[in-house]
Amino acid sequence: MKNEIKKISEEDVQKIAVLTRIAMSQSEINLMADQMSNILENIDVLNEVNTDGIEPTGHSAEVNSVMREDISSDSLKFDDVMANAPHREGDFIRIRPVLE
């Protein structure tokens, strides 16, 4: 049985815009209401697919990781790390400011 999907109203979009602090014009609100309703309709179609007996999967094909094993090891020695620092300030590495 098909679920009845409620169409997203412009008021709903306005509430979401206020909560997320996103300024939207009336034309953007109209467009977003239509697009969000369309997304919910598409999800409703997917919910109708019979998945009984289908094993959940994260990928449609077999995936092998190319990452190495996460093996803990000893940390680098402090003096070795500091020897590569371009600028030092005491026991710290000095970098250019990223925020002003």
Image (cartoon, grey):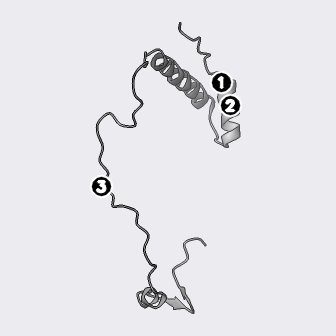
- The residue labelled by disc 1 is 10
Instruction: State whether residue 73 is above or below residue 45.
Output: below
Secondary element type, mark 1:
helix
Q: Earlier in the sequence, mark 1 or mark 3?
A: 1
Residue sticking out furthest to the top: 1
Asked whether the beta carbons under mark 2 and mark 1 sit within 8 Å of each other, the answer is yes
Q: Which residue is mark 2?
A: 14
Q: Residue at x 70, y 39 (%)?
A: 19
**Percent x, y of residue 75:** 46, 79
Badge 2 marks a residue whose secondary structure is helix
- Residue under the point 57% across and 31% down: 28
Give the image location of residue 64, x and y in percent: 29, 47
Residue at horizontal 65 percent and vertical 29 percent from the top:
13
Q: Are marks 3 and 2 in contact (CB under 8 Å)?
A: no
| Residue 63 placement, left or right of 2 | left
Q: Amino acid at mark 2?
A: Gln
User: Is residue 16 left or right of 95 when viewed as pictured?
Assistant: right
Residue type indicated by callout 3: Val
| Depicted 15 relative to depicted 48: above or below | below
- Work out how far the residue at label 2 is from the one at label 1, CA to CA, in angstroms: 6 Å
Q: Nearer the viewer, residue 15 or 39?
A: 39
Residue position marked by numbered label 3 in the rendering: 66
Count of numbered circles on the image:
3
The one of 65 and 33 positioned closer to us in this rendering: 65
